[in-house]
Image (cartoon, grey):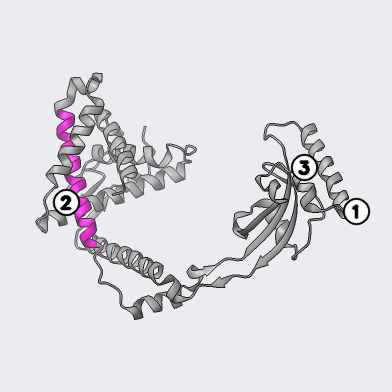
């Protein structure tokens, strides 16, 4: 598991452990959020996982609407069931937790949170909960690797993948632009923006009357390319957005936009210097990347099939009424 995402996951789980005393919604009337061959998966475990996953999913985003949040809860319920099934499969295969990994993770968290009020009040219980969690994480990492095992692709496999996904190995169109940017702060008032547009229109008129574009860029442009006469070099057209992308798409080589274009950074004059058509990269040049993509997609496919088989072999019943209600 990648270190940063693992840290975020562990932090979120620790927060859920701190809040482990909360009770589930009074609307919970069944044996659990799900049953697997009649064995319940508890509502409390589900709600802790919802809390943990929500911290990662929505922490930097706007609060989700009701439909999005209910869909998220259903996704978490499915993930929890899959977690249970994979842990059972790992144990069935005789896999054991990595004791060194578990010990290191517990030591790091104890060093970080020792001394906090709740840790000192209930550290023994929390350490045991965290030990179980890290042992399960170790097993899950092992079984995930096992379920993703695929044979090394043959040359024919990679060639076939390349032929079937040629768009992934095609370099997009590139465009070389020259610009003159009159920067305007995002918080500027209308008068400031109007003044920038009027100045840009004057510069544009002088260029049409014969002034060299590069000379004008060196004098007026606030873009880093000013020292190069406004020449920004080649770039993928996809990096352009909004009105500027629309304007550039309609210009031929050597053509300048008829009017100044308002962008987030200010007001810009733009000229297309050159274009490069999309180019398909030769197979030998992308063989390594094609092999990596084939392997990644093949691993995901066999993993999905393996988890589907684990689910199909069991009688899984979800508490649909609980999933369709927002928590109190």
Task: Please give the range of residues in magenta.
Answer: 125-147
Q: In front: mark 2 or mark 3? A: 3
| The C terminus lies in quadrant | top left
Locate residue 307: give its quadrant: bottom left
Q: Is residue 283 above or below residue 318?
A: below
Residue for badge 1: 209
Q: Secondary structure at mark 3?
A: helix
Q: Is residue 127 visible?
A: yes
- Give the Cα distance between marks 3 and 1: 17 Å
| Residue found 28% across the figure and 38% down from its top | 10
Residue 38 - label:
2
| Residue found 23% across the figure and 50% down from its top | 83
Q: In front: mark 1 or mark 2? A: 1
Magenta run includes residue 142: yes
- Nearest the camera: 312 or 90? 90
| Residue found 79% across the figure and 53% down from its top | 213
Residue 5 - label:
none
Disc 3 to disc 1: CB gap under 8 Å: no
Q: Position of residue 101 (x, y in %)?
A: 17, 43
- Nearest the camera: 99 or 277? 277
Q: Is residue 266 left or right of residue 105?
A: right
Locate residue 125: give its quadrant: top left
Mark earlier in primary sequence (3, 1): 1
Mark earlier in primary sequence (2, 3): 2
Q: Is residue 199 above or below residue 176?
A: above
- Nearest the camera: 162 or 60? 162
Q: Callout 3: few (<14), some (14-19), or many (20+) C-alpha neighbours within 10 Å?
A: some
């Amino acid at each position: 598991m990648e270190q940063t995402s693992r840290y975020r996951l562990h932090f979120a789980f620790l927060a859920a452990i701190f809040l482990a005393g909360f009770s589930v919604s009074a609307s919970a009337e069944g044996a659990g959020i799900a049953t697997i061959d009649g064995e319940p998966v508890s509502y409390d475990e589900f709600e802790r996982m919802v809390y943990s996953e929500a911290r990662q999913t929505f922490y930097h985003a706007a609060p989700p609407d009701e439909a999005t949040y209910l869909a998220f809860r259903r996704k978490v319920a499915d993930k929890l069931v899959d977690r249970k099934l994979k842990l059972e499969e790992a144990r069935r295969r005789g896999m054991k937790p990595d004791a060194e990994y578990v010990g290191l993770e517990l030591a790091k968290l104890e060093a970080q949170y020792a001394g906090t009020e709740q840790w000192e009040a209930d550290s023994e219980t929390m350490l045991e909960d965290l030990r179980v969690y890290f042992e399960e994480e170790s097993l899950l990492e092992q079984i995930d690797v096992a379920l993703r095992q695929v044979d090394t692709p043959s040359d024919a496999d990679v060639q076939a993948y390349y032929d079937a996904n040629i768009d992934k190995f095609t370099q997009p169109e590139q465009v070389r632009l020259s610009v003159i940017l009159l920067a305007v702060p995002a918080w500027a008032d209308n008068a400031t923006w109007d003044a920038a547009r009027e100045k840009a229109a004057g510069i544009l008129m002088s260029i049409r009357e014969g002034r060299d574009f590069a000379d004008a860029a060196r004098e007026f442009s606030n873009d880093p390319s000013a020292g190069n006469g406004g020449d920004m070099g080649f770039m993928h057209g996809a990096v352009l957005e909004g009105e500027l992308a629309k304007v550039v798409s309609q210009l031929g080589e050597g053509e300048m936009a008829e009017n100044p274009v308002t962008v987030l950074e200010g007001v810009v004059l733009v000229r297309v210097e050159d274009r490069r058509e999309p180019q398909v990269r030769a197979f030998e040049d992308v063989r390594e990347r094609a092999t990596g993509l084939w392997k990644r997609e093949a691993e995901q496919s066999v993993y999905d099939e393996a988890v589907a088989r684990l689910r199909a072999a069991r009688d899984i019943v979800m508490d649909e009424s609980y999933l369709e209600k927002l928590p109190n």
